[in-house]
Amino acid sequence: MADSLLSRVPVVAGLAYIERSGHLPAAFPASLAVEDDNRYFPHAIAVLAEGQKIGYIAPEVAAKVFERVRAADTPLNCPARRAAASDHETSGVEFLLDCSALFT
């Protein structure tokens, strides 16, 4: 997967967790956690900030990195940031992750 794509991974389903994420700063550390019991998406990777779920890695990316996240001995962390207003308006994406250091 190209580095440019990994530096801008969308966090989806963020609106479901908006009460948890409304206070987050413009940039913050995020953790990734595999959800083996997610009945809707077999490759679900939750995105956590301050220990609380704020969404999921976009499915098209999650399917490609799922096994690497699952195999990690410790939770994987990466920088996160608020998406631009245009990202939110066109796709509903609230946050973007920079996973380039994790999956290169």
Image (tube, rainbow, N blue to C red):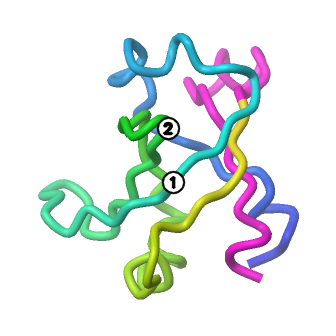
Q: Position of residue 79 (x, y in %)?
A: 72, 49
Is 24 located above or below residue 65 in the figure? above
Q: Is residue 72 left or right of residue 29?
A: left
Q: Residue at x 50, y 38 (%)?
A: 49
Q: Nearer the viewer, residue 90 or 32?
A: 32
Is 27 located above or below residue 34 in the figure? above
Circles 2 and 1, Cβ within 8 Å, touching? The answer is yes
Q: Position of residue 54 (x, y in %)?
A: 43, 33
Cα separation between marks 2 and 1: 7 Å
Local SS, label 1: strand
Q: Residue at x 33, y 66 (%)?
A: 34
Q: Nearer the viewer, residue 93 or 81?
A: 81
* Tag of residue 49: 2
Please tell me in which quadrant of the rendered image residue 38 appears: bottom left
Is 33 located above or below residue 13 in the figure? below
Q: Nearer the viewer, residue 87 or 82?
A: 82
Residue bearing mark 1: 31
Q: Is residue 71 left or right of residue 85?
A: left
Q: Residue at x 46, y 67 (%)?
A: 75
* Tag of residue 58: none
Q: Residue at x 53, y 77 (%)?
A: 65
Q: Position of residue 36 (x, y in %)?
A: 20, 69
Please tell me in which quadrant of the rendered image residue 6 appears: bottom right
Q: Which residues are magenta?
A: 82-104
How packed is label 1: few (under 14 Cα within 10 Å), some, or many (20 or more)? Answer: many
How packed is label 2: few (under 14 Cα within 10 Å), some, or many (20 or more)? Answer: some
Please tell me in which quadrant of the rendered image residue 20 appears: top left
Identified by mark 2, the residue type is: Ala
Q: Nearer the viewer, residue 54 or 13?
A: 54
Q: Is residue 1 magenta?
A: no
